[in-house]
Image (spheres, rainbow, N blue to C red):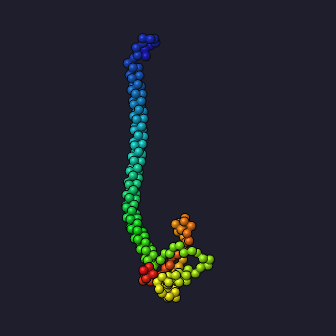
Amino acid sequence: MSKTKGKGAVPSPSEARSVSSALNQSDTALKQLIREAVAEAINLLIARLNNIDDKLADFDKETIQIKEKITEVERSTRGNKAGIRDIEKQVKSLENQMMETQIDKARFLLRIQNVLEQGEENLKKGMAALLAQLAGRTDKKLSEEITAAFRVSSAYTSKNLMPREIYVRFSSLATRNVILK
């Protein structure tokens, strides 16, 4: 600077150059710092974006796996439904067979109502004697054709205070039909 120091002093050209040079250097250093800070911020953002891309890729993989599992479950469900339909058909078939079997067994039964109960009764022998009189056969022969005789309670007999019904099972349908005629 000039020798006179004061408020309006004019710097010498060499001083001005040195101040200008110092300002340029600090300006260049400041610009370099800003560039480095911006580059670091950009690198940080790129790393975060890459992390987000990786997470999205993982989500996409998981979504694909879930869709595959859903498809697999739907396939097995369809298979299960078909299996259930088959089982339902088999159950209906078995129910029909059971009903037919019960009907076939019932063909051999004769139901008798309003026969008073006695203490220790031998139903097979008593029914053979009673039915032999009706059919005009001998007790012994009819007793051989009766496989079982038993009493059964029904709601009707219980409600109306009647004796239990007697069921007589015959070995042949022909014998039962002869007695019914």
Which residue appears at 47% of the width and 77% of the height?
109
Q: Position of residue 100 (x, y in %)?
A: 41, 74
Q: Position of residue 144 (x, y in %)?
A: 50, 87
Residue 139 visible to the viewer: yes
Between 49 and 77, the one lying in front of the other is 77
Q: Quadrant of residue 173?
A: bottom left
Pick the front one: 157 or 170: 157
Q: Position of residue 23 (x, y in %)?
A: 40, 25
Total marks in image: 0
Residue 164 vertical position relative to residue 47 in the rendered view, above or below: below
Q: Vertically, is 116 above or below 140?
A: above
Left or right of 103, for residue 148 = right
Name which quarter of the figure residue 108 lies in: bottom left
Q: Of 60 and 166, which appears nearest the observer? A: 166
Q: Nearer the viewer, residue 181 or 39?
A: 181
Q: Quadrant of the C terminus?
A: bottom left
Q: Residue at x 47, y 86 (%)?
A: 136
Is residue 95 shown left or right of residue 117?
left
State which quadrant residue 18 falls in: top left
- Image: 89 above or below 31: below
Q: Is residue 83 visible?
A: no
Residue 43 pos. (x, y %): 40, 40
Direction right: furthest residue: 119
> Split into 4 quadrants, where in the image is the N terminus?
top left
Q: Residue at x 56, y 71 (%)?
A: 163
